[in-house]
Amino acid sequence: MTSLVTRPVDLEWRHAAHNYKPLPVTLARGEGSWLFDVDGHRYLDMLCAYSAMNFGHRHPALIAAAHEQLDKLTLTSRAFSNDALGPYCAALTELCGKEAAVLMNTGAEAVETALKIARRWGYERKGIAANAATIIVFDGNFHGRTTTIVGFSSDEESREGFGPFTPGFRRVPYGDLAAVQRAMDDTVAAVLVEPIQGEAGVLIPPAGFMRGLRDMCAAYNVLLLADEVQSGFGRTGALFACDHDDVVPDVYILGKALGGGIMPLSACVANWDVMDVLTPGSHGSTFGGNPLACAVGTAVIDLVRDGVLFARAAALEPMLRDALVALQGYGVDAVRTRGLWAGVDLSAEVGTARAMAEDLLTRGLLSKDTHGQTLRLSPPLTISDDDLRWGLDRVVESVHALQT
């Protein structure tokens, strides 16, 4: 039993900034689909660090790659080349069907990188007047927490107290092609979109939206920037969420699962006619493309290259969907699923999604609320059928219990 005097959670409260309100559990160990707290209690991970842990905790191949690289070299900065960067970028661009990658650390950094690429491309290639470039974004977006990114968010909680914000963004309703059309003019350099909005509650756009967006961007000579930080690398039952609509963006924005849940690793991946606007001194990162992250990232690509994990996510979706849809009218108002990803809108009589996440915690399941009434579920792609079924049974129990 952990001493009450030295409990990690107390030290966290005293010394870590209060920018999160975590669920009341202190985790200490992970194995596959399961996490264990400081007192040894076991929990099924149905959040997976917002898709960063797509391959479960401490996947043997990823841990082995990290250990091997730790014995050789961890960081050089980009002042020098390292022997892991080139092979990793070659493998990543081949997987994405693109020609070049720029590596960063976090998803927000990758989004900021894509915005810089788009603006410079707009000035140098499209001929937009200096400092006039516009980027179209969408209501409900979540692309990170930097001041630029929260500046074009529609979530006031993310924005309050952080202005003034960066100009040059035009926000329109998500899924509304007509609104995108109205926002288009000669100043538009790019459209930034999540093919599925994760933080908003796993919102899936209307059929034809992504295809229409791709065609419109091509017609207006505008870059399509696809933020696949949460949706990429198998979460939706395909390599990318864009694949469900046979859409190839101009820039893939990647993160989270890219680093296997071991190293922060993010990337923008594009062809050279877009990427070559970046020149020495125009962009960089001390830790971006570090050998340790590249080694783990290469192992991640080895895991996903054959598509087996994507197929598994697609095959398990009916189990996930059917269990949740059966609750509609019985404490659940709406359900959205794509692969092993679900947003569950709870009815008022059940209470808030935070209350349900806390109840599920007592039943041995980890999940997360968003926007009041929506519960998010994103189990590992490696989860067993029995574990997924067990987890869904706990969700059903919780919905029924919270109504009584």
Image: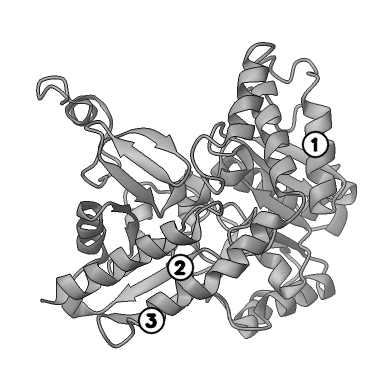
Q: Position of residue 388 (x, y in %)?
A: 43, 61
Residue 13 drawn above or below residue 185: above
Residue 342 bears which disc, if any? 2
Which numbered marker is on residue 89? Answer: 1
Say whether disc 2 or disc 3 marks the residue closer to the N-terminus. Answer: 3
Measuring 79% from the left and 58% from the top, which residue is drawn there?
Answer: 250
Q: CA distance from mark 1 to mark 3?
A: 41 Å
Q: Residue at the spot x=43%, y=48% of the render?
A: 164
User: Picture quarter containing residue 344?
Assistant: bottom left
Q: Is residue 1 left or right of residue 93?
A: left
Q: Tell whether 369 sits left or right of 355.
A: right
Q: Quadrant of the N terminus?
A: top left
Please identify the quarter of the rendering in which residue 322 is found: bottom left
Whether residue 275 is visible to the viewer of this picture, yes or no, is: no
Q: Earlier in the sequence, mark 2 or mark 1?
A: 1
Q: Is residue 54 above or below residue 224?
A: above
How far apart marks 2 and 3 lie (CA) works out to 10 Å
- Residue 112 in the image, given as x and y percentages of width and height: 61, 45
> Dot 3 corresponds to which residue?
334
350 left or right, relative to 246: left
Residue situated in front as seen by the camera: 112 or 202? 202
Q: Tell me the number on the disc at residue 196.
A: none
Where 162 falls versus 286 (above or below)?
below
Amino acid type indicated by mark 3: Ala
Task: Name the kind of residue labelled 2 in the image.
Answer: Ala
Q: Where is residue 277, by image quadrant?
A: top right
- Secondary structure type for disc 2: strand
**Location of the C terminus (image quadrant):** bottom left
Total number of numbered discs in the rendering: 3
Mark 2 vs mark 1, CA separation in Å: 31 Å
Judging from the image, what secondary structure is the residue with disc 1 in? helix
